[in-house]
Amino acid sequence: MTDRITLKEVADAAGVHMSTASRALNEQTRDVVNAETVARVLKAARRLGYTPNPLARGLRTNRTMTVGMIIPDIENPLFGPIIAGAAARLGSDGYSLLIADADLKDQASVARVIETLIDRRSDGLILATSARSDPTVAELANRNVAAVLVNRTADASPLPSIVGDDHEGIGLVVQHLVDMGHTEIGHISGPQTMSTGHGRYQAFLSWTQSLGVEVAPTAIEEAAWYRVEAGLHATSALLERRPDITAIVCANDLLAMGAYRAVRQKGLRVGADVAITGYNDTPLLDLLEPPLTSVRVPYRQMGSEAAGLLISMLSSDNGSGSPVSLRLTPTLSVRGSSGPHS
């Protein structure tokens, strides 16, 4: 195995002192070094194949150069791109990402995982596990733990968050179904304890009202969780109660897959008798029959933005910082599951 190139070797190759080389290689201190010297150091580092030593950097800054990320369901495919985006952004700045899975239905479990990551001296946290009412969020802010919420928000959260614009996303779906001639539109909502479930439900009510579509309470069914089985049970109950429904807006893709099963169990055809839409546009939806129309959210960007915000907080020593909310713009992937009203 090749020995790691040291900072001293870079400094010697550039003809400068080690401290000068260190400042030139650090984006945050580079401006105090002569521009010509910076260029010479960077050229030497590239030629030698130098990469910073995270352990040594951590010793200098009293950091472990690790960030903990907690997700609520490691089997849910939407979290893969979020993790990938965060890992890439953190890695480019010398940080390693630790992934932890926690049961969102057990807030004590979430709290234990958070404490474990803090005990292991993670420099900061990225949380995809926040419920709307989550005392952990306020506690982290009070303890000055650098943390960012991703794909979830908490009511009156003191922590910054990076989420998709669910109001806009649901609007794209409802407008599409109305354009297809549907007037009897139902909704399979996510759990109302989650910001995604509650926000998409509220957006559904807002958009149907603004577009002149009457939606009775009987046209809405709350799923117990974001799982295929929950989507099956919720859709079965909805169609039993409202057989006149011709289109169903599901709060995520897994619920929509369950809705496929429920529609077929009723002897109906997806896309022809009942239009179905999902949310998240997770991979391989085009392999369903018919392919699922779904709202595409830039989840890899979401992970990258969350990591970048956390790095900024750590670099400026602002702790949790002031609340910042970034909403990423979604798009609609129209496929065969949302055919016109016959």
Image (tube, grey):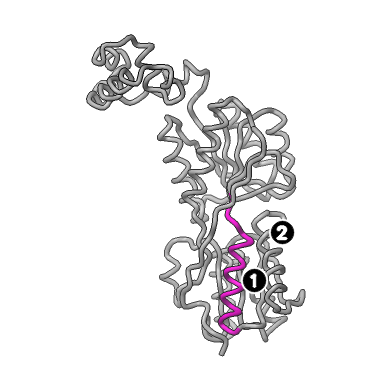
The residue tagged 2 is: 192
Task: Name which residue lies at 57% across and 69% down.
Answer: 172
- The amino acid type found where label 1 is placed reads His
Is 317 a magenta residue?
Answer: no
Label 2 crowd (10 A; few <14 / some 14-19 / many >=20)? some
Quadrant in the picture for the N terminus: top left
Q: Quadrant of residue 127?
A: top right
Q: Residue 150 at x, y = what percent?
A: 58, 46
Q: Nearer the viewer, mark 1 or mark 2?
A: 2
Q: CA distance from mark 1 to mark 2?
A: 17 Å
Q: Residue 312 at x, y = what percent?
A: 54, 32
Q: Secondary structure at mark 1?
A: helix
Quadrant in the picture for the C terminus: bottom right
Task: Name which residue lies at 74% across and 45% down.
Answer: 156
The residue tagged 1 is: 233
What is the residue that sits farthest to the top in this orientation? 17
Point out the stretch of residues depicted in magenta: 163-181
- Dominant secondary-structure state across the stretch colored magenta: helix
Q: Quadrant of residue 149?
A: top right
